[in-house]
Amino acid sequence: MSAGFTHFDAAGQAVMVDVGGKPETRRAATARVRVMMRAETLAMIRAGSAAKGDVLGVARLAGIMGAKRTADLIPLCHPLPLTSVRVDLAPEGDDAVAIEVTVQTTGRTGVEMEALTAASVAALTVYDMCKAVDRGMRIEALRVVAKSGGKSGTFRQD
């Protein structure tokens, strides 16, 4: 296997990386995603008139819950004691909801997967709550835009 892949042993078997010897450091990661929709759908969200209730509030809670359950969903992720999960959702233009999630911990491994999972779950929740009126919604541009802490240091992208 390629030396760049840490989740495989010499025989090519999937393994959970041993982080026991790594020092604990303050770690953070921020992920973003966008849910594209019809202008009428966003107007409904802004007005708070969705049949299922407060779309952005429910999606915020779902994102937080998703971050906390990442190790249950991604097979080789370490369960982490998260110290903070912030999920921000905001209308963007007249046809999108922008979602940004920042997750923090003090530990031996990063929280990129927790941030990505939270952003994904929040976006999926927006879709679920609005799908009856807009089946053509699209979830786009999921990515890590920043991470800090650990041996690899700081990473940022726009």
Image (spheres, helix red, strand yellow):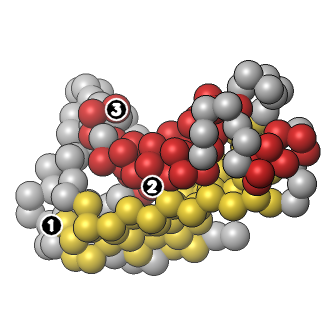
The three-letter code of the residue at mark 1 reads Lys
**Residue 118 visible in the shown view:** no
Element under disc 1? loop
Question: Which one is earlier in the sequence, the residue at label 1 or at label 2?
Answer: 1
Element under disc 2? helix
Which image quarter holds the N terminus?
top left
Along the line of sight, which residue is nearer the eye, 104 or 18? 104
Question: Looking at the picture, how far across and down is residue 4, in whole percent?
Answer: 40, 49
Q: Residue at x 33, y 67 (%)?
A: 84
Q: CA distance from mark 1 to mark 3?
A: 24 Å
Q: CA distance from mark 1 to mark 2?
A: 21 Å
Q: Nearer the viewer, mark 1 or mark 2?
A: 2
Q: Nearer the viewer, mark 1 or mark 3?
A: 3
**Residue 70 visible in the shown view:** yes
| Left or right: 105, with 120 as reference point | left
Q: Residue at x 57, y 73 (%)?
A: 156
Tell me the crowding category of disc 3: few under 14, some 14 to 19, or many 20 or more residues within 10 angstroms, Cα based: few
Along the line of sight, which residue is nearer the eye, 118 or 93? 93
The three-letter code of the residue at mark 3 reads Leu
Element under disc 3? helix
What is the number of the mark on residue 22?
A: 1
Question: Looking at the picture, how far across and down is residue 8, in whole percent?
Answer: 29, 35
Quadrant assignment, res 111:
bottom left
Q: Residue at x 21, y 54 (%)?
A: 80
What is the number of the mark on residue 73?
A: 3
What is the number of the mark on residue 115?
A: 2
Question: Which one is earlier in the sequence, the residue at label 1 or at label 3?
Answer: 1
Which image quarter holds the C terminus?
bottom right
